[in-house]
Amino acid sequence: MKKVAFFSSKRPSLKSHFYRNMMILMIALMGMAMAPGVSQAAGVPLNPSGIYNTTADDGSKIFLYRYAPYTTGTPKFRTSGTPIVIFTGICMNMNQYLSVTTPEMKDAYSGVYLPSVADAPDWALNSTKTDYEPYIKADKMRYYSLAHYLWLQGFDPWFVNYRGTGRGDVKSTAANPNGMTTLDTWATLDAPAAIAKVKAVTGKKMFIGGHSTGGLASYDYLQGAYLDYGSINTAWAKKSYYQLNYAMGKMPHVKGSAALAKNRNADIKGFIGLDPAGVPALPDLLDSTFFWTLVGARLYLPLDTISDNLISLFPQKPLVGLLEGVFGMINKAAAGDSKVSDFFDYLNFWVVEDMDPCLEDWTVRYSIGGASLRGFGHYMDMGLHKTLREHYLNGSENYLSKLIAGGSTPDPGNDKYYYFSENMSRMTVPLIVFSSSAGSLVDPEATFDFIISKKSATAYDKWYVLSGTGHFDLAMGNRMPTTVFPQLGDWLKSVDALPANPANTTTPATRIDE
């Protein structure tokens, strides 16, 4: 890895640009502090009859939401449609897929962009193609909602809050200390509980997937990954085993079962990946005792609470100004060809030009979710060691010895870690993946190398790389209504019509640039 010089004398224009943006940010911050706040008492409207919960094997309470447009009457759930279970990214909650105009933001969100009827995609229009469909016409924010799109297509969409995330009536709670939660916890305990709940309610096969970590949780599930529960396989024994480990400050190892993977794949129609997380590109400077100690700490970032009680006080315009100032500067800095640009490439995960300002506001006001530092440490281990494996602190032999040293050099089959990358072939269902072109956090080629090329390929596997997108904005940005929704809808309908999971092929999905 090349050494990074933050600013070079050869790039005075970039330095000047940086200082100018920092001044804009300072003015924006002052404006936030002085401006009157916005009440967020009402929050995101949810249909009470669409709220479900379930209990994970360790006793955690996981909330799900079955979507139908919020109305004062009886919700029109798509009970006859195929269920689709969607998980969120790290630091997010289910609201990232549920964009609507909340009562307190009625005026602020009135300016959200909607193309003319003549330029609008067919899916958003009424049956005569003369106007928008009634729910989008009543609330333009629904144009960007994955939940609403899936519902319009006749599917039965469900959304999940991992333990420690969510707000109000859909906040999931953890049996373990939140600071011990890792990506494994969500993938091996929360995801199976949520999927089992949807199966119990609907009795149907389903699609599963999500954005970033939501994709990781889904493909981990499909390869039969589970958290080790000891020698006695009963509900009481599992719960006791997990909670005993929690009390000692430990997390068990992840294990995998080919038989369990086969059964899980038989119940799933297909996998949806919105820039699914895997092995991020990270700078070598993170590989130090300081950073390993930091991400090994049992600290939890209650971002839901911070957003609900602090960010909610900021008016929309200065809040969006702050976001666009920060990430706009990063977008421009990353576009160059220098050591400075190399550094900013790592931070270029939100392309602000790809996102409507109202959706930017929605993201930080309603969609931010909690996360533990150990969750970030999990990604750090995978990124620095170029591997896709369980958390490096899992197991009695690691929970103290690796706290400040980080994960060891990968040695699959010999180091007692479970490697998701070595068992990806157990994922046999059709796949559709949308990758961001910026490549920060999730590089398209890494997604191909570690996931797409290693799963059992089918003739229905699809892989799109969307130009002008970043990892964060891809799931709520401008390309969703115009590109992702139509491509996803066509794929869902073709795979949903199959009588059974298609036979495997020898050719992985090829890249399609959009």
Image (tube, helix red, strand yellow):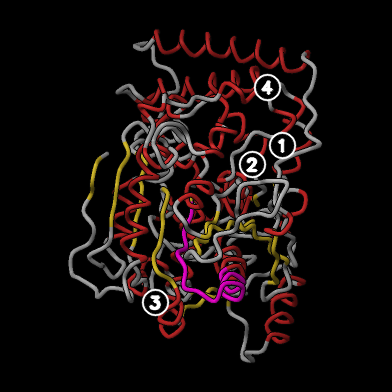
In x, y percent, where is residue 81?
48, 64
- C-alpha span from label 4 to label 3: 58 Å
For disc 3, the marked residue is 413
In the figure, 129 relative to 260: above or below? above
Crowding near pointer 4: few (<14 within 10 Å), some, many (20+)? few
Q: Amino acid at mark 2?
A: Ile
> Residue lying furthest left in this view?
506
- C-alpha span from label 4 to label 2: 22 Å
Q: Earlier in the sequence, mark 4 or mark 2?
A: 4
Q: Amino acid at mark 1?
A: Ser
290 or 308, which lies in front? 308
For disc 1, the marked residue is 307
In the figure, 259 relative to 406: above or below? below
Q: Which mark is residue 368?
A: 2
Q: Secondary structure at mark 3?
A: loop
- Contact (CB < 8 A) between labels 1 and 2? yes
The stretch in magenta equals 195-210
In x, y percent, where is residue 232?
64, 91
Name the side, left or right, on which 364 lies relative to 431: right
Q: Secondary structure at mark 2?
A: loop
- C-alpha span from label 3 to label 2: 37 Å
Q: Which of pointers 4 and 2 indicates the residue nearer the eye?
A: 4
